[in-house]
Image (spheres, grey):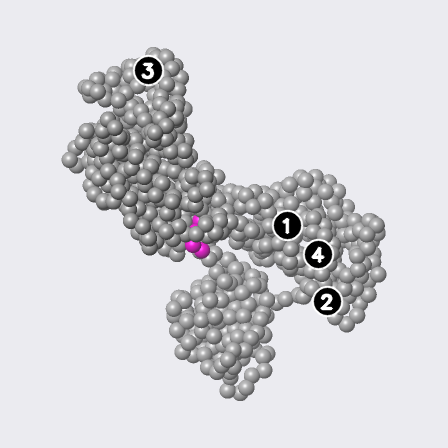
Amino acid sequence: MSEVRAVQKTEMPEINAQAAIVVTQHEGRILLEKNARMKLSPAFLIKIMASIIALEKCNPNDTVTVSDSVIKQISNWKGSASINLEAGEKISVLDLIYSMMLVSANDSLFALAEFICGSLDKFAVMMQEKAKSIGAADTTVTTADGRFTAEQYSNAYDLAIICRYCMTNRMFRTIAATDKYTIPATNKNGSRDLQNTNLLINSGNRRYRYETAIGIKSGYTARSKSCLACSALPPASKFGEEVLAIILGAENTKQMKYVFYDAITLLDFTFNNYEALSGKKPEQQNSEAEKTITTVGKLCEILNAELRNAADVPITSFAFGKQKIKPGCAYFAADKETAVAAFEKGASVIITTQPIEKIPNIVVANLDTALSRTAVFIKSALGMWTVAVMDSPEKINPLSMIEQMLSNKMETVHSISVTNNYNSMLHAMFASTPKTEAAVINVSCVNGGNVERVSQTANFDVAILTSTVVSKNPRELTKPELIEEKLKVCGGMNESGAVIINIDDKNLAGIFTIPQDIITIGVDNRMADYFADNIELSHNKISFDIIHGADNYHIELYSDDKHSVYQALATFALGEIMGIPPKQIIPAIEKYRPSTGLTTVRNERGIYVISDFENEAVESVGTALKELCTMPLSPDSRRIAVLSEVGDGDEHELEIYRKVGNIVNKASVDITVCYGETAAELMKTADLKSKFVIKLNTRQALTEFLKLNLRDNDAVLFKGSTVTELDEIMTEVT
């Protein structure tokens, strides 16, 4: 839990209990405490630990047959709370948990211990291991029957950790909040009615009932006195969030049950002074809610996975691989090293295939499956449009125009890699925020089987096919094979979706067998749903009319290439499918300018700073170097290239960088800096004897090198991905 506290403007209210703590459920931020680290014997620890272990280890519907041994053990404990189980009685795991949580039934505890691991002693070991695994370092469990021993203890701080963890389990949360429960009749007994002994949620007790309480467990022994773990939401009209309170060692008198009185005192005080205690303001809480995509608990449920060491905190974004880790994100890690590094950078939870101690962890069977399920969830949770733009030659590819048009109307993410469809699609989906409304995904036929996989995950609403031809065809597919490959995108699409097809391409014109709606585009082709007419070419401009039914829309496009008309037709048709009015689509199309992604500025020292962090096509590295080398400079100025990865570091990108080494040999670059292993591939082909080429792997090393070596009036190129933080380094050094 967080040891960071806001500056408290109020004192801890006076309570009867020996020790207490109040923390936020989501962040674990400590709001109030009294003797929180004092070693005490908590009355409810064993029942809570037994319940969460049973929920995690068993199917709630599993049937337990009560043994003679269980009955013998409980008969030796006079006055022990029980539900009077009988030998041979068959009862469900869920009913046993309810009886432990609501009325502290020890016979149910013994029956579960034997069912799960064979004996109370082994169950105690399991509890001890569980406590340590979720961060309760000062808790010791030596016996599983809950009786006092000098070696068995905990404290309010540790119990808050344990209860926060338990309350992320949906079933535990439901049980903890239950006022009354009826155990159905069994083979040995009739039905049993249970009434929760936690008076905060007990409907029969008006004096101590707290309307917004949602659990958790009360307990009492002569040595530990009255103890309580409780959770509550802010009452209506009060500012705050869910908090958890632990109260230990409170007195009982005939006139007052102090443990519940103390709980009400602490909860009321917390919600009456929440802004001062938490350091948060109401508008900040609303803002944080708007930034949340889901929660750790919900993600765990989606992935059908095991949650370890984690509270049900909000998740604001997702990341995997080399994507930038933002505070509050859920990060998918391939190994322990990257998992720990991601947690240290602020990730809320790490998704792995192996448990990792001491960090918030969701353990899945298969990381790739988890990535896919998460992408599917992101689309569903955000209600976003997903658009597939099937790869085609650059002149006719509408990807960039579509992305710019949509970005004018809504928050949009996009991918442009043509070498790794699947990873590129995941990167785009994971870049989504709670405000993202559309994802535009480039889908190529480079890798076999990739199209179906991408489509099944992204569940496209619209697909766009403007050409049979592709920009890359390493598999040397024939035109019929290319058509078949491209149409595989329909297999994972919504059947209520739409496919935009260029019917001027004769190979596409005959496609009418797909289940989705077919929307056709064409130039001078009145058979098309959207066709271009009255095309006029002039210097750097092309004007035409888009005809759709009885509607006619005039467009002037910044281009001297007739192929760009197809881009505009596809973009216009998509906009209308997505419900964007033509009066908003047309200006966006007319403002479109093909971009290399390069920007150039000159700072106060006269340094020309060329940068490109947007163009993810690895071939753009050569274009960026050309821009650097052709820039007119004074004789004493130098040309410096700082290069890092732009994609996923796959074999295609490595091959491109090896070719870049040959470009460096011929280019007038004075210093070439390779930032990271991917860019360093160019050193395999660069002439290292005659060219100054250096490899740097850390941000600190690169920053220091540039600060020492950049001179006034130099020209420096920064080419890479924002994932590498190269953009931040550029800002710092220039």
Judge the density around disc 4: few (<14), some (14-19), many (≥20) Cα neighbours within 10 Å: some
Which label was assigned to residue 584?
4
Residue 256 lies in quadrant: top left
Which residue position holds label 1?
A: 387
**Left or right position of 231 against 45:** right
Lower sequence index among marks 1 and 2:
1
Residue type beneath disc 4 = Gln
Dot 2: element:
loop
Residue range (magenta): 326-331
Q: Is residue 330 magenta?
A: yes
| Measured Cα–Cα span from mark 1 to mark 3 | 58 Å
Residue at left 43%, top 75%?
A: 706
Which residue position holds label 3?
A: 89
In the depicted structure, whether residue 711 falls above or below residue 295: below
Q: Are marks 2 and 4 in contact (CB under 8 Å)?
A: no
Q: Horizontal and vertical percent for residue 703?
A: 41, 71
Q: Are marks 3 and 2 in contact (CB under 8 Å)?
A: no
Lower sequence index among marks 1 and 4:
1
Q: Are marks 1 and 3 in contact (CB under 8 Å)?
A: no
Q: Nearer the viewer, residue 462 or 288?
A: 288
Q: Nearer the viewer, residue 690 or 724?
A: 724
Dot 4: element:
helix
Residue 93 visible? The answer is no
Residue type beneath disc 3 = Glu
Q: Which callout, 2 or 4, points to the residue nearer the camera?
A: 4
Which residue position holds label 2?
A: 558
